[in-house]
Image (spheres, rainbow, N blue to C red):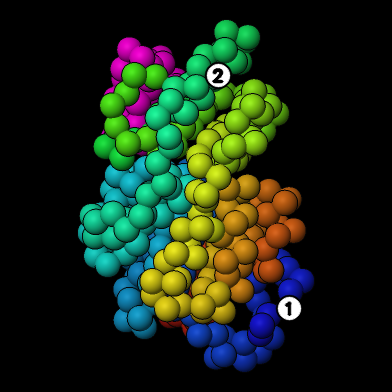
Amino acid sequence: MPYSHAPSSTGAGPRGAEARADIRLVVTDMDGTLLDDAKNAPPALAEALRLLRERGVLFCPASGRQYATLAREFEGVADGMVFIAENGTYVVRDGVELSSDTLRPGVAAAIARAAREAAAGGADVGAVVCGKSAAYVERADEPFLAEVRKYYLSHRIVDDVTAVDDDIIKVALFTFGSAEHTVAPALAPFAGTHQVVVSGEHWVDVMNRTANKGAAVRRLQRELGVTPAQTMVFGDYLNDLEMLDAADWSFAMANAHPEVIRRARHRAPSNNDNGVLRTLARVLDLPLPL
C-alpha cells in the first residue's frame, strides 16, 4: 500500500503515491459521505464522473437508499454506472438487476410487528418494508413521510405492511430518537438470523445475513476482474464496515462513526468538506475545480 495504514486527517499519502495508484473501481456511500449534511451532491461531481469514465474507472454509489432514489440522484450521468442499493440487497446496472437478496416470506411481517410493538411501548418509530417495486409504509403522518421521501422515491402508504405482495429485500425502521440505543435493541430477536445494522443516526436496517454492501462489492469485483488493491471505498456509518474490508483503499470520512474510523485504512476530509472528490482528485490526480 502506498499509504500508511494509520489514518491521516486529510487522506494525503507520501509523494508519488498517486502515480502508483491503479484504481479501477470507486465505491462510495451517499449520506454522510458523498453528500453534505444538506443532502447536496458536490458541484464538481458530474465533471469527476466524466473524468473517471475517460480513465476506465467505474463509479458505484452504495447506499441504504432505494434504487429509484439513487437513479434520480444521478439522472443524466448514470449510463454504465452500477448502483448498490438497499445496503447491498439490490444491485442494478443500466436498469437491469445484477443481483438481489430477498427475505424469506414472513420475515418482513415479523419485523414490522416488532416495530409496532416498539411503537406501542413508546418509541417514535415506523417500519419501511422495502420491495423491488416500491417501499411500503403504514404510518402516514407528515413528519415520518418527510423522512421516508428522502431515501425512498417510490413509496406507497398501505393499510397493513405485513400483507404486501412484492419481493422484499429489506425492512428499514426509522425513529426520531437514537436508532442505535432505542430501536436496535428491540430487534435483538432477529440478530441471530439476520443482519441488524444501524445505518444512520435514526435508521436501522434488517436484511439477510448474506446481504451487506461488502458482499455486493466483492461480487462486483469478481464480475469485473477488479482486485481490492484496485478498489477505493468511502464510508461513514456502520452499514459501510463490510465494504471497507473489500478495498485496500478504504477511507473513513472525518465525520464517520468511531468504529468506521477504526476499521478503515485511511481518513478522508468530512462530507461537508467535499471529502470524496478531494481524495479522488489527490489520489488519481484529477483536475477538478474544487
Q: What element carries label 2?
A: helix
Magenta extent: 134-161
User: Considering only vertical position in the picture, is 148 above or below 265?
Assistant: above
Residue that label 2 marks = 114
User: Considering only vertical position in the picture, is 88 above or below 144?
Assistant: below
Q: How far apart are marks 1 and 2 (CA)?
A: 44 Å
Residue 29's label in the rendered image is none
Residue that label 1 marks = 4
Q: Is residue 201 visible?
A: no
In-front residue for pair 60/227: 227
The image shows residue 152 at horizontal and vertical percentages of 36, 36
Q: Can residue 100 be seen in this view?
A: yes
Residue located 57% across and 90% down the image = 20
The image shows residue 250 at horizontal and vertical percentages of 61, 67
Residue located 46% across and 32% down the image = 171
Q: Mark 2 belongs to which amino acid?
A: Ala
- For the N terminus, the quadrant is bottom right
Residue 188 image-quadrant placement: top right
- Mark found first going from the N terminus, 1 or 2: 1
**Label 2, residues with CA under 10 Å away: few <14, some 14-19, many ≥20:** some
The image shows residue 83 at horizontal and vertical percentages of 36, 56
Q: Mark 1 belongs to which amino acid?
A: Ser
| Residue 143 painted magenta | yes
Is 74 left or right of 284, judged from the image as shown? left
